[in-house]
Amino acid sequence: MGKILFVSHDGDTHETELVAGRSLMQHATGHGVPGIDGDCGGVCACGTCHVILDSRWLDRVGASGPEEDQMLGMTPERQPTSRLACQITVSADMDGMTVRLPEFQM
Ligand code: FES
């Protein structure tokens, strides 16, 4: 088992046990990570699962698709390494990944 670390905008950390197979949004909400809402249930329609990845992890996880990119375009705190957590599937090779959270979700 590995770990995924979530870091809030003000530096609070929340370490989670990596469980492969679910979306990163489901993973976070299932672990009670504050700051990820997932209002649409994971269908890329709300933007409330915005996360910011380290660039080396973005290279591994991959860039956003067109639909996700459009949704991210409405996110005020968008960064070059922003993704929507519902569009990322947690895998075993994400052990050690750090995920930063914006101050606000849409
Ligand atoms: Fe709605 Fe990700 S949960 S866009």
Image (cartoon, grey):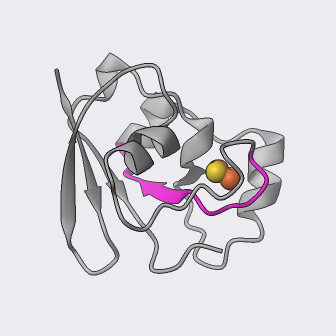
Location of residue 16 by image quarter: top left
The N terminus lies in quadrant: top left
Identify the residue at image location x=23%, y=29%. Answer: 95
As drawn, is 4 to the left or to the right of 44? left
Location of residue 97 by image quarter: top left
Rendering coords of residue 29 (x, y %):
43, 50
Q: Nearer the viewer, residue 40 or 2?
A: 40
Rendering coords of residue 99 (x, y %):
35, 52
User: Relative to 9, is 55 above or below?
Assistant: above
Rendering coords of residue 32 (x, y %):
33, 54
Q: Residues in magenta? A: 44-56
Identify the residue at image location x=56%, y=33%. Answer: 62
Identify the residue at image location x=37%, y=20%. Answer: 20
Rendering coords of residue 8 (x, y %):
31, 70
User: Relative to 75, is 56 above or below?
Assistant: above
Location of residue 42 by image quarter: top right
Report the number of discs.
0
The C terminus lies in quadrant: bottom right
As drawn, is 1 to the left or to the right of 82? left
| In magenta stretch: residue 34 | no
Q: Nearer the viewer, residue 84 or 82?
A: 84
Identify the residue at image location x=48%, y=61%. Answer: 36
| In magenta stretch: residue 55 | yes
